[in-house]
Amino acid sequence: MNSDSWIGKFYQFGEAVLFLLYVNFLWIIFSCIGLIFFGLGPSTVAMFTVFRKWVMGEQGYHIGKLFWQTYRKEFLRANGITWVTGLFGLMLLTNLQYFSLPDPIWNLIVKGVFLFFAFLFFIMVVYLFPLYVHYQNSFQQYFKNAFLIAIYQPLRTIYALAALFTLYYLLATFPIFIFLFGGSLTSMVVMYITYVTFVKIEHKQKRIEEQLEAEMKTKKREWSYEKNEYLPSK
């Protein structure tokens, strides 16, 4: 079927909608299998894993099988990182709701500090699960790298936040979409934006490494000339 025709585009759109519906269905079912508390973390990691393969252009994999394998393999680690994140978020939310000081000025200042940390926490979480499914790191590195990327890639972070707020408006306007593909659509958008960010960072790091390597070779040649021995670099 010609994908350039309107029929082809409609067919592709239909496939994308079914894809989102199916992944969202798996996410809900596997979250419920783990009684939410034990199932939400590994189910979310499995969902991001599916969309990571999608955004990387990989084809020919069985979605349900990949979802189940990731859910089972990452069950303990995914629960660990989800519980730590949820506990920290709950602490921030509790402080925002109930912490208060008698002095209104100081109370306003402290509330502002909590809001600032809540914002930093939110933008860190945006990168946390994509980092988890894309790289092999320790727990500390996941949180550290998520925070650093969110801070040092402000334009990409603003782009991600704008997309999330747009999705929030869409889902709030049409609540039925929350159940149909609220989780899958959100994770797909986040995975796409963050993956592009990761690729840009990796490309930049590669250029820096190549530049440092070239500088080291130049210094080695200069040192060899001083010794009256030209030693070509390998």
Image (cartoon, rainbow, N blue to C red):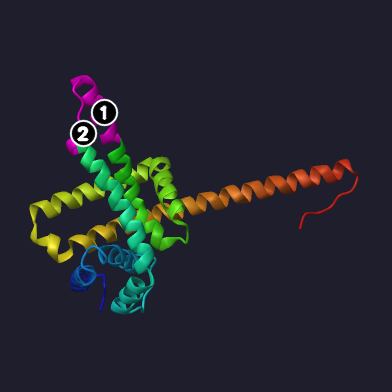
Q: Is residue 83 magenta?
A: no
Quarter of the figure that contains the C terminus:
bottom right
- For the magenta stretch, what is the residue range? 97-116
Task: Give coordinates of residue 67: x percent, y percent.
Answer: 31, 73
Taken as a whole, is the magenta stretch helix, strand or loop? Answer: helix
Please tell me whether residue 105 is drawn above or below residue 136 in the rendered image. Answer: above
Q: Looking at the rendering, which quadrant does residue 56 occupy?
A: bottom left
Labels 1 and 2 touching (C-beta < 8 A): yes
Quarter of the figure that contains the N terminus:
bottom left
> 223 or 117, which is in the foreground?
117
> 184 or 115, which is in the foreground?
115
What secondary structure is found at the residue carrying circle 2? loop
Residue 110 got which mark?
Answer: 1
Q: How many C-alpha atoms fall within 10 Å of the one at disc 2: few (<14), some, or many (≥20)?
A: few
Type of the residue with mark 2: Phe
| x 80%, y 46%: residue | 221
Separation (CA) of disc 1 from disc 2: 9 Å
200 left or right of 29? right
